[in-house]
DNA sequence: CGATATTCATGCGCAACCCGCATCAATGGT
DNA sequence: ACCATTGATGCGGGTTGCGCATGAATATCG
């Protein structure tokens, strides 16, 4: 037989109101139920806490000692529960993110998985989109923030860099360039070049990086997604320049990775959001975790 | 559905041991029962406190916040219970008292009744005895202390006075002395004097007080108890000298009360105990209450 | 990859506990 | 003495919590 918190509540209410009947009413119990809770508490403690007749209820000396303690225990519990609920409130909710496919595929799952271990009550909505659509989703406030390439300079948007990475050459293992340590962009002019379409963020970065180059690769295949480029390379149809994140991790049976120089073109992936917009606690939490996670990795 | 202390215990044990099975064993529950208590706690709080697989148990971020709070609540409860039990221990037990009949009858019940309201767990054993027997009981340590007349001067005993009172004359209402304001002890020589036996403490005090008086009352009736004296007076058989405490309170249909002078003989009733002897907390408590109660009244 | 041991979650039946209603005894007040 | 009020207790019924048995999930090992 153990002490219940309900026993303590019954005792405190009865002591406060100096009446079993009134206390029972106050804590929504019948008088007999309250009577028994007091008796139980007294039995467990082995002391009389209240002296009572049908007309009068008063604290014994032990009861007077115990009352402030009981009250404090109940107050502390209430405080702790409110505190946890407050924390929980902060730590639940929905985080909505618009994300370019590369980041969605290559690093977001890991971060979300880790985050979910700490905050299992926080849900996610991930919108998979090209860099331009990510921007639009952020500007229209359809999502809390975006993870995308940095290229535009919009005063309404904040950009926080997460990763900066070079473009590398992916070519078939039996390709003439496969054994090279590095290849210049100009040398690609003589090979079938696979690239993404004009409207894409990656294409824009490449074009901007090559603006001053006299010798440039000419697109032989234009695709929509970087992963499709990789597929064509693997099929031996040509070479492609992809950001490092998109390259296969470790040795690949069919694809070689070669450094691209002259120039070294880099892209930055980061968090973009509307300047000064406040978001839910959950979104803030995830945002912080993203920053700490990827800044540490770099 | 409310939080139980058992829920908190289950949580703390599981967090400490990082295993449901081990925690269940540690707090003497089956694993399923423990599992359900954790689930209940999580449901009430609306958060996941523990992340678990069949192989691993770890705290969520909310769980990490809540653990020290839960631990503290349980610690505080334990402390409060021990404290109350300690107090209760001090406030329970047995008080044994040897007491002259007058005090036993006339004032002890009130004090015990009041005391019992504050310390209902303290029991009493009252030995009703003449002054000499009270002394013996105290000296032999058969009782915690005595309440008796003060006459002896024993270096082994401490005496603390409670009440000092004069002897008064009780006589039938139709007696010649009944209408007097005061009567000298010498005048009683001409009347039938009812008194207690030679061995009694009251008799001793009277004899000592009258040692220098040339004219003294001669005992016509010798009885054992003061209350018997009063009975005889009420029956019209004589007059008696009794301490004020033994006189009827307020007007009496058959007995008049008259002051006794020349000399005014007083007796002191107080607490007698063995010098330096330590007693139970309960006996100390009652002793203190006796002192405060009767010193206030005088 | 399959087999295995371990561990948390859940269904089930049973016992314990707690409830409110009804009733009685005690207690102050008139 | 009578009466209204209030705490204690018996009783029956509903709720809660238990352990046992079982299944699913999870690491580890060969």
Image (tube, coloured by chain):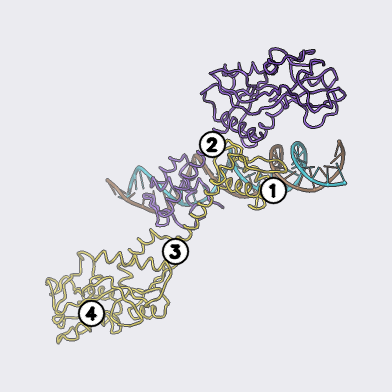
Chain colours: A purple, B yellow, C brown, D cyan
Residue D18 on image: x %, y %: 65, 48
* Distance from Cα at disc 4 to Cα at disc 3: 47 Å
* Distance from Cα at disc 3 to Cα at disc 2: 43 Å
Provide the residue designation for mark 1: B21
Provide the residue designation for mark 3: B90
* Distance from Cα at disc 1 to Cα at disc 3: 41 Å
Provide the residue designation for mark 4: B194
Q: Judging from the image, what secondary structure is the residue with disc 1 in?
A: helix
- Residues marked 2 and 1, same chain: no
Residue B135 on image: x %, y %: 35, 79
- The chain letter for the residue carrying disc 1 is B
- Residues marked 1 and 4, same chain: yes
Residue B46 on image: x %, y %: 58, 35
Instruction: Name the N-terminal-most of marks 1 and 4.
Output: 1
Which quadrant of the figure has residue B281? bottom left
Q: Residue at the location (34% across, 81% down)?
A: B132
Q: Judging from the image, what secondary structure is the residue with disc 3 in?
A: helix
Q: Quadrant of the N terminus of chain B?
A: top right
Provide the residue designation for mark 2: A87
Are the two marked residues, 1 and 3, in contact with CB atoms closer than 8 angstroms?
no
On screen, residue B233 versus residue A293, left or right, reads left
């Amino acid at each position: 037989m153990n002490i219940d918190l309900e026993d303590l509540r019954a005792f405190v209410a009865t002591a406060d109101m100096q009446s079993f009947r009134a206390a029972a009413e106050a804590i929504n119990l019948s008088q007999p139920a309250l009577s028994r809770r007091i008796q139980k508490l007294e039995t467990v403690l082995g002391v009389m806490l209240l002296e009572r007749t049908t007309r009068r209820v008063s604290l014994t000396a032990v009861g007077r000692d115990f009352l402030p303690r009981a009250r404090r225990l109940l107050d502390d519990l209430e405080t702790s529960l409110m505190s946890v609920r407050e924390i929980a409130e902060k730590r639940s909710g929905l985080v909505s993110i618009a994300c370019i496919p590369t980041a969605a595929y290559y690093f977001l799952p890991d971060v979300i998985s880790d985050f979910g271990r700490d905050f299992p009550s926080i849900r996610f909505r991930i919108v998979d989109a090209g860099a331009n659509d990510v921007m639009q989703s952020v500007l229209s406030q359809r999502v809390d923030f975006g993870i995308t390439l940095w290229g535009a300079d919009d005063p309404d948007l904040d950009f926080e860099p997460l990763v900066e990475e070079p473009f590398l050459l992916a070519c078939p293992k039996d390709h003439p360039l496969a054994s090279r340590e590095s290849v210049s962009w100009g040398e690609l002019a003589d090979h079938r070049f696979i690239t993404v379409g004009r409207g894409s963020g990656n294409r824009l970065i490449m074009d901007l990086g090559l603006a001053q180059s006299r010798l440039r690769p000419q697109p032989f295949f234009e695709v929509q997604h970087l992963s499709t480029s990789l597929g064509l390379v693997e099929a031996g149809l040509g070479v492609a320049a992809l950001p490092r994140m998109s390259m296969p991790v470790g040795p690949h049976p069919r694809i070689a990775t070669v450094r691209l120089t002259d120039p070294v073109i880099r892209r930055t992936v980061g968090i973009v959001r509307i300047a000064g917009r406040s978001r839910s606690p959950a979104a803030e939490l995830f945002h912080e975790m993203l920053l700490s996670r990827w800044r540490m990795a770099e």
